[in-house]
Image (cartoon, rainbow, N blue to C red):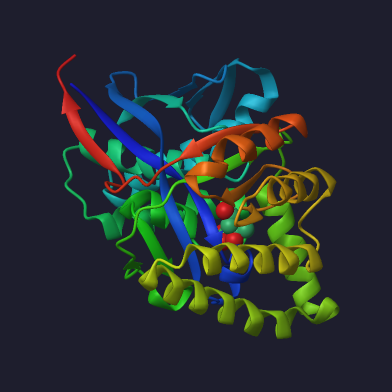
Amino acid sequence: MRAVAVAPGKVILYGEHFVVYNVPAIVMAIDRVVKVSVSPREDGSLRICSDLGFACEYSDGDVKPIMGGKKAVTFLEPVRIAARTVLEYFNEKKGLSIDVHSAIPSSVGLGSSGAISVATVAAVSKVLGHEISKEQVWRLSLRAERYVHVTPSGIDPLVSTYGGLLVWRIQDGTKPKKINRDIEIVVGNTGIQRSTGKFVSMVGRKKTKKIEGISQLMGVMSWISNLALKAFKEMDIVTLGALMNMNHELLRIIGVSNESLDRLVEATRKAGALGSKLTGGGGGGCMISLTTLSKRAAVCKAIKENGGQPMIVRKNNAGVKAWLVKN
Ligand code: MEV
């Protein structure tokens, strides 16, 4: 018997980084998922394998890379932490084989690590025979998320767990509010992989030192997110686009954009996007555009011509799902 879980990635439409400081953010689960398969092992060891070319075996406190060298140890660490957290939570000592397949590009701000942690928690619980709520899945995935994002808000595993288009701030805990709207987003991937944790820490240092007026910008970002929520209610996509543009300027001020992102943002606006901004941790990774259908092809073309890779994403409503499969 093995368990399989799928969980979606995400795009943050408004409020990344600021969400770490309890500012409301709006985030959408996307139709790109990771799939994690887990089966029990007789020898009591843990073996994790990813289709990105990494594999490790863990036994008696030792780790042995089987594929991908030292990088495999770092890359697979969140999966190991997520699996360990579930084993400890249920006080189980079983060995496990975990296979990770991802259709979400990694380290580019689309929530692949959050989705992998969430799917691992759900699949490991399932194979051990424990039914857990979505709230527990989210809570148990946070330890792995902390390894990746250092001081995360928890928004990535949250949207991966619940799915949908959500407005959330830290103090809402496990109660995100669903926005019942459907939109399509054009993503532009710069192809530059980077660590979200590094940028979260950098913003944290600037906030502590009170530089660049970050505390005051928190108020501006709350205002943008609240206006975006109102614009969603009225489905006022022109305002939604303008608010994305404003959000990008705030992200530039706090220092998380870069030349490649700014170039794609600028080019997509010129090609007719209603609004464009970076999405996720910044420093590379992806940007997003909101466009009308008639401008979509031109926006995708602008992304390609400026060195990016375009991709259209839609809402995933289901969030994480896990089931058992007979071998
Ligand atoms: C990363 O997808 C979103 C950040 O706001 C970090 C977090 O909230 O954990 C940059």
Percent across and percent down for residue 265 are: 72, 50
Q: Nearer the viewer, residue 206 or 129?
A: 206
Residue lying at 40% horizontally and 54% vertically, measured from the top left: 159
The picture quadrant where one finds residue 16 is: bottom right
Does 256 sit above or below residue 264? Answer: below
- The answer to whether residue 46 is visible is no
Q: How many numbered tags mark residues here?
A: 0
Percent across and percent down for residue 222 are: 57, 80
- The answer to whether residue 101 is visible is yes
Residue lying at 22% horizontally and 55% vertically, measured from the top left: 133
Residue lying at 32% horizontally and 35% vertically, measured from the top left: 6
Q: Nearer the viewer, residue 148 or 293?
A: 293
Quadrant hosting ligand 1:
bottom right
Q: Nearer the viewer, residue 92 or 218?
A: 218
Q: Residue furthest front?
A: 294
Left or right: where 38 falls relative to 251? left
Quarter of the image with the N terminus in it: top left
Residue lying at 54% horizontally and 69% vertically, measured from the top left: 239
Percent across and percent down for residue 102 are: 46, 28
Does 165 sit above or below residue 6? Answer: below
Left or right: where 146 falls relative to 70? left
The picture quadrant where one finds residue 44 is: top left
Percent across and percent down for residue 20 are: 58, 69
Quarter of the image with the C terminus in it: top left
Q: Nearer the viewer, residue 306 or 270?
A: 270
The picture quadrant where one finds residue 203 is: bottom right
Does 238 sit above or below residue 62? Answer: below
